[in-house]
Image: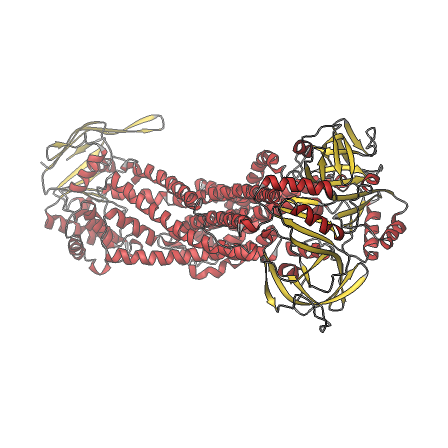
Amino acid sequence: MINLIRLSHRDLFSQKKQVLFLILNLTLGFLGLFFLENLKEVVQKQSHLKSKEILGADLAVSARRLFNQQELQIIKKELDSFETSDVLELYSMVATEEGESRLTEVKAIDDRYPLYGGLKLSDGLYTNQEKKLILNPFEVWISEDLKFSLNKKRGDILKIGEKEFKVSQIILDDSSSSWRGFSLAPRVYVRIQDLKQTGLVRYGSTLAQVKLFRIEEQKQSLSLKTELQKKMLDPAIKVRVPSETSEQVSRVFRYLSYFLGLTSLVALLLVALSLIFLFKNLIQKRLNEMATLKSMGMGHQSIAFIYCYQVFLLSVVAAGLAEAFNFFLLPLFMGALGEFVKIEGDIIFDFSSMIKMTILGFLFCLSVCWPLIRKVSYMRVNSLFQESRFDFTISIQRWFDFIPSFICFILLSIWQSQSIKLGLIFSATFIGAIAFSFLLGLLFLSFLAKIVKKCSFPYEVSIALKMMLRKKMTTLLSVAVLSLSSLLIVLILQVKEGLNQQLSGGDESERPHFFIFDIQEEQVEELQKLVSSKGISLENLSPMIRARILQVNGETFQRVENSDFETQEDEAQRRMTNRGVNLTYRRELDSSEEIVEGESFALTKTQESDTNFVSIEQRYAQRLNLHIGDELVFDIQGVEIKAVIKNFRKVRWTSFKPNFFIQFQDGVLNEAPKTFIATIRHSDKNLLRQTQRLVVRNLPNLSLIDVSVLIKKIREIFHKILEAVMLMTYLCLFVGLIVFFSLMSSQSREKAYDIGILKTLGSSNQSLNRWVFCEISILCFSFVVIGVLLGAGTSHIFLKVLFDADFVFNLREIPLYLLCYMLLSFMIPYIVMRQLTSLKTKNLVSY
Amino acid sequence: MIIELKNVYKSYAQASKKLQILKGLELELQKSETVAILGRSGSGKSTLLSLLSGLDSIDSGEILFEGKDISSLTEKEMTRFRGQNIGIIFQQYNLMSTLTAFENIALSLEIKKEEDISERTLAILEQVGLKDRANHYPHELSGGECQRVAMARAIVGNPKLLLADEPSGNLDSETGKKTMDLLFKLCEENDLTLILVTHDEILAQRCQKVMRLEDGVLLS
């Protein structure tokens, strides 16, 4: 064993240049993925350390409504002996004396708040122990964001609902908010008893009630949580403990990490291609020695061991280097990540996570190199003795040898995206893209072969073409690597364009400017009058009825618990199941929705029909596993209503019109207690602002969302995610260039030899440069064409399947990016090769 | 006089030492003459060939080719000159692995932008007895066949001077003899001037003139 290890070391040391190239490639391939894993680990650790402060309790029971008596009794029975604090959270307009208003998140607290963590206010800290600062009656603490947007200072008056409040403190930091930035509504703290007098807490108000408890014993909190969940009938009631940190980490950050993770895998895939090539070269150079050893009695297991150990060493060194880079990179990127997640204090690297990633890196490399190791281990000695004659090539026909590496890549994709669907689509797309690039490359080469046969070219062009044709594997690998890189450019920019189009698409003139919610039934008429007094009409007035699904086809609709490994789909299903539903009824479909499955039903229920029909939004139906014809039982304010699913609807959510997951026929729920939501639109922004002031002054419980602000916020998030993904893409493109450079460099010895011969035969430097120029130009041209074709295809699939968006070619950016990448891809090998052509002939012959 | 070397000096730096290889070497060669250069390993035989072919430059002295000093040519000029006037046969064949036998030979003519490339290539292939191996790659040919391709490549462009560095050094005695028979036949048929560097005394005797390279000078 020791001898084998020594042999492996000696083998690697004797090929320093190739080994260094391999390590460089692997390090870059690991860098992105390892960076992301370290980042996730840091965020996870931070949120774990701060989890109590973020939750503000050892146990929190919450609902997106007020608890009913029965629920309050359960809570009291189970948790009466523990210290508790009550919180109410709702969205409401906050108005200034001058009539300006803004949507805010109002957090109403009692004097026991917070049980953990606290607030950093302009005059000092406010925590459980430190309560020198008191929130006095009809005083508010406002966030800095609100202070700036309304231009208010301490002592100024703000109106919330029907009451006026004095601004007494500015919130500088809030431990209960787990992430910064992108907040649609800034936060305002008021006393809970004051909120009740504002008139905002009434039926249908968009509020959440939270009860916080100090338990201290973690085990006890967990058992209490289980007990409460069993007793609470409504799955929409959330019982949370601090250990469920995943819930507390920003969802935006999690989505970001999914996309970053997948992008980083492209770098790994690129490196896998170069690994096959470079490791093959490493083996080929030592075939004779291996043959000699085999003839001396060394078994194939020992040869396999030598190479497996070499893969292990290479991947461990590369993983170590990637981790070392991350020590420097991670702190640099922490500032930028503040937009997604709150990170404070020192960054602590987790050793076990490093080990885990190193093992993962090794297994991936081994799965890629295994077909080569297997081939060399079982090779017949008589073939191996003829080193100069034996061609240790990888045949495309033996593609199935790479199945373990495909499986490895698929598993990595699923793990990174936390989604079986997305992981499969991603891995299938990229593995398919490699296969297609090889196929298209082969077609291109056979076309070139015909051209070479039929046409006569200057000898420089002729040699370039012949070289490409006869070094088929190198040509195909180079084309595949660069095509994959250009595919990534096209894919990212296409998805960006597609989603941009979706956000700004549709008929702009039909898009509402304000979204009004919390409209009580008796306020509809007055609201209509107020709005029309400004010459604007109230549109898309939709009733909203709060309900709960009790049964699906006679089976109780149960709470879904989160598991250890939860995919995106599982999480979406859990979130959708464990929440209340808002129902509506309509006489006709809106232009933003269409029936995609099932039959249309009479939008107004007739007397003759006993059955109530509902229409379900298609993605919601998928998440809850609902089918056409399923019978649903709803609890609407204690009344059970049965309905049958008649059809599935596709909703264009980016129309920003009021739309609902579940829609009843008109005539079924008309008498149920409800609130309304509506929209207004007008081209005159001044008139809209005046209308907003009028509505807030006369109906202060109503909330208005400025759709343009909402779109801006969504765009902001989208662009921030995209910026981060672009950074990872740049890393992948850089890896692509390095891999291409490695492939070209590995040929430099051979090229130098050829150049030497040509020079000896009288070929001038210009001719040799023309040859190199021609060869690299053809490679670059073919990769751009293949990359664009593959990129257009894959982005079409991604946009349609994942985002339900249309394909619009991004003509503004793609040509520019591709041109830059093509120039870089061209220049790097060209410079290297030019150096060779300018070397003295004598040097070349003795190279 | 086709080639004349006057008082040629050449040295190489080896570690911190200067290794003097050629020390005032003199050589004169008439057109169509064949000369063998014998010498021990490390005596400077290959260095001499490098200088004659312009692959390396002299420290001092003169190399006159048909009366013209070629030692002062730039690398670009030398490359062109070599292509037009000198054919080289290497011990290691030095064929391009990605080109067939035919293409390797034709390349020499293509570089010089000559005419009737295909016909001339096929003709020389026939001369060296490899017409049926025209489309084979070097790795599909035997050592003797590779050397015949290399010889064909060297003479297809009708060079005035043919330089051969141990052309049979990599071949077994039987194949080596056959290959050398062919080389001398080709030289005779094409009226070539040949400088043959070898260890082989018997082979050297087949040349019109035999010289020994000893202590940096050529001795008759």
Q: Quadrant of the N terminus of chain B?
A: top left
Name the foreground residue: A225 vs A233.
A233
Residue A301: x %, y % from top left = 53, 56
Residue B99: x %, y % from top left = 28, 52
Instruction: Work out which residue is located at the far bottom of the displayed protein and give it.
Output: A608
Is B87 left, or right, of A408 in this rendering?
left
Name the foreground residue: A368 vs A54.
A54
- Could you tell me how many numbered marks the image carries? 0
Q: In which quarter of the view is residue B25 placed?
A: top left
Residue A195: x %, y % from top left = 80, 41
Give the residue at x 63% y 66%: A647
What kind of colouring is applied to the model shown?
secondary structure
Q: Can you see residue A297?
A: no
Q: Quadrant of the C terminus of chain B?
A: top left
Give the residue at x 67% y 58%: A661
Name the foreground residue: A273 vs A121.
A121
Name the foreground residue: A487 vs B54.
A487
Is A183 left, or right, of A209 in this rendering?
left
Q: From the viewer's perspective, is residue A736 above or below residue A143?
A: below
Q: Can you see residue A36?
A: yes
Residue B200: x %, y % from top left = 22, 45
Q: From the viewer's perspective, is residue A669 above or below residue A812?
A: below
